[in-house]
Amino acid sequence: MTVAAHPLVVRARELADGLLAPAAERVDQEGVPASHIEAIRRSGLLGVSAPVAHGGSAAPAAVVRETAEILAGACCSTWFVQTQHHTPVLTLAKTALPVRDRLLGPLARGELLSGVAYAHLRSYPRVPVRVRREADGRRFSGTVPWYTGWGLNDVMLLAGVTEDDEALFAFVEAREQPGLRPSEPMRLAALTASRTVSLELDGLWVPEEAVALLMPHADWVASDHPKTLNANPAVFGITRAALTLVEEEYAGVLRARLDEVRRHAYALADHPVPQERAEERLAVRAEAFTLMRTATEAAVVTGGGRTMLLTHRAQRLAREALFLLVQGQTSTSRAAHLRHLAQGPR
């Protein structure tokens, strides 16, 4: 079976063409509706990487990437809300702790939607969220700077650093409760629709049976680092979408370059040793960003003054491209990207 013919890819395209893309400009201004998330739930896409035994599809990496490209290119805000779900699923698939039996099936089948609150772990040695042990559980204190999908998610995978410099992840209901208070939804230059808030944690108590992962923070960093080296499939999705708005005389040249960079990026992503060829991965990641910016700029130029209207697709894609430049950014990836920019046009 080809990637294009895979049932989940077919469903992603149907969702993109029939629901997400036609509503994307309205969603950009009004917010991701619950109906979009319900459609994602029904599609089976929330279980794209989940084990078959628990109701998922365990799809090949190429299928996972293709569905991400399709959703991001159609409505980046909806893609961003649902993409948070896949890390909790993979975390549960790898753990032997009791929370796996309780949550993996419902998450894999799309009965529950999960968000994530762990990116702040990458700011270490600064520790925005601390965890201390308490009888039969843990208490979380501090601030989660960014949390996406508030009001849409059922649960969240929340992380903090313990007194022993361990990274601890636990599942928490995604609702206001004693010890957990959300901010007002943030107004952002792009993806305000994703319902992003910050979370104030004031002694939030979590039972021990909700813990999904506990490991030395240094080991977590080592496992997380390769994930931030590769090009994000959403970047190629936005690029593809922007090129549909560009006159073919010019889009054809950029599309050929897109195919080349994409092949290179995914060959690296499929390399059996994710820690190897780090500099090459970062260089290709930066080149993908450059191509995305060129494509969205070309879409704006093609559309002319009309693109300044908030109802125009080109300006939305250009703003979403700005967001992807910093999404998942680390000090390593930032430095590599800035070096790439400093080299100037080639």
Image: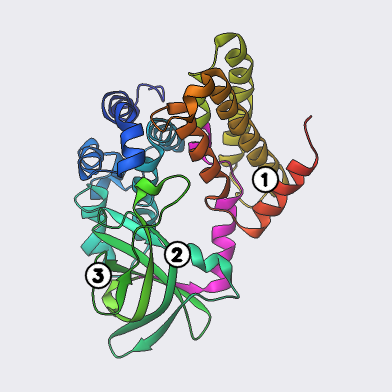
Tell me how many marks there are: 3
Q: In this view, does 333 lie to the left or right of 10?
A: right
Mark 2 or mark 1, earlier in chain: 2
**Circle 1 — which element?**
helix
* Mark number, residue 282: 1
For residue 176, the mark is 3
Whether 230 is among the magenta residues is: yes
Q: Give the range drawn in magenta.
A: 212-237
| Dot 3 or dot 1, earlier in sequence | 3
Estimate how packed mark 1 is, as few (under 14), some (14 to 19) or many (20 or more) residues with alpha carbons within 10 Å.
many
* Quarter of image, res 136: bottom left
Residue furthest top as drawn: 249
Mark 2 vs mark 3: in front? 3
Which secondary structure lies at badge 2?
Answer: loop
At label 3, which amino acid type do we have? Glu
Q: What residue appears at the point 23 percent right and 63 percent down from the top-left corner?
A: 101
Amino acid bearing label 2: Tyr
Q: Position of residue 339 (x, y in %)?
A: 76, 47
Where is residue 129 drawn, in percent x and y? 45, 76
**Tag 3 or tag 2, which sits nearer the N-term?**
2
The residue furthest bottom is 135
In reply to whether residue 304 is colored magenta, the answer given is no
Quadrant placement of the C terminus: top right
Q: CA separation, marks 3 and 1?
A: 39 Å
The majority secondary structure of the magenta stretch comes to helix
Instruction: Count neighbours of disc 3 (C-alpha within 10 A) and say few if under 14, some if 14 to 19, many if 20 or more.
Output: few
Residue at numbered disc 2: 118
Q: Is residue 241 visible?
A: no
Viewer-closest of 199 and 274: 199
Q: Give the Cα distance between marks 2 and 1.
A: 22 Å
